[in-house]
Image (spheres, rainbow, N blue to C red):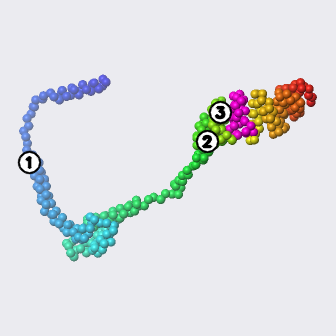
Amino acid sequence: MSVINKMLKDIEQREVTAQLPIEPTVEVANIVDIQQWIKVGLFGALLLGSVVLAYLFIPNKLSVSNEVSNTPQSVAQLTPSVTAESMVEVQAEVPATLTSLPIEGERESPAVDLVESSSKQTEPVSPEPSVSSQRFAAAAADEKQQMNNTVVQSSPPAQPASARIQVTRLTTRERAEEWFTQGKESFKFGLVDDAIRDLDKSLTLMPMHIDARSLLAAAYYGRGQLAQADAILRHGLSLNPDVMRWRILLAKILVERQSYESVLSILSPSHDAHANIDYWILKGTAAQQLNENSIALSSFRKLTQLQPDQAKWWLALASSSDAAGEQSNARRFYMTALELGGLSPNSRSHAEKRLEYLGGRL
């Protein structure tokens, strides 16, 4: 900042010094420069002469060029309205001497033939191409280019075969299957929320989709939402009561909730003809818990008929017979279960104690 301040002070001092009055010491008289005035006069005379010469000679040259340019009158008249369709007619009306006019790309060749052929009718002119002929050729070229552009623009571009897309409309069943597939994949990877959303969309499109409803109920059951799973299955059974898969899943949920009476209601005798192993297991278990011995006996007897080599079914049948007071049958069933083997230690111990109590021996 000190340097800047110093510079500013120096500038101020210089301005003050420049404003100080200085008294003149020597007076010089004015001297007239004669040579300078002579030069100015000569320059003015030369400029005036150039203007006069230009005024005299330029109109003559313009008149000569106008005569040359107006010689092919038919060409000058056709130049403003040249079209591509009248090109043949125009060329026929133009004198033969104009066929050698230079077109674009041929300007380097001199137009001597044009001058020699027209010298018989007009005064000799300089061998330069006329303006009208050049305009005629340029207009013809422009018109041809515009026609080519019009043809190119009017024709629509052809689409390649690869760019054509065929849209196939899916049916309601196909859309439901796609949502079911997505939900099943999400369920496999543990994305239960996504699976529930996709399966619900599948059921919205197709309420009778057995696999989608079963998997959706299983998803709710796996998350511990037993009420939601119960509602999903009951709604399905209201639509189609003959779907045994929904009936058995609902019975499992009811056993989990210890609603044994509801189990027997769901697995009523009217559905026994289409029962499988799971059906008889759930029905016999619920009947045992409710002391419905006749139902339990019939259920476990069915199981021993379907899987006679399974000791656990014979043990269950023996327990039901023992509870029903059928001691002889109970002893026989206990012995069969112990002979087949494969029981857990607790189950085997229970069978041996009951057999000893009933007076049976192995």
Q: How far apart are marks 3 and 2 (CA)?
A: 16 Å
Circles 3 and 2: CB distance less than 8 Å? no
* Left or right of 84 on screen, residue 261: right
Query: Where does the magenta region start and end?
Result: 244-272
Image point 58% across, 43% down: which residue? 205
Judging by the rendered image, the residue that carries numbered circle 3 is 230
The circle drawn on residue 207 is 2
Circle 2 SS class: loop
- Amino acid type, callout 1: Ile
Image point 61% across, 39% down: which residue? 199
The x, y position of residue 161, in whole percent, is 53, 57
- Amino acid type, callout 3: Asp
Which comes sooner in the sequence, label 3 or label 2? 2
Circle 1 SS class: helix
Is residue 245 covered in magenta? yes
The x, y position of residue 352, in whole percent, is 88, 27
The N terminus lies in which quarter of the figure? top left
Which comes sooner in the sequence, label 3 or label 1? 1
Circle 3 SS class: helix
Seen from the viewer's position, the closer of residues 279 and 187 is: 279
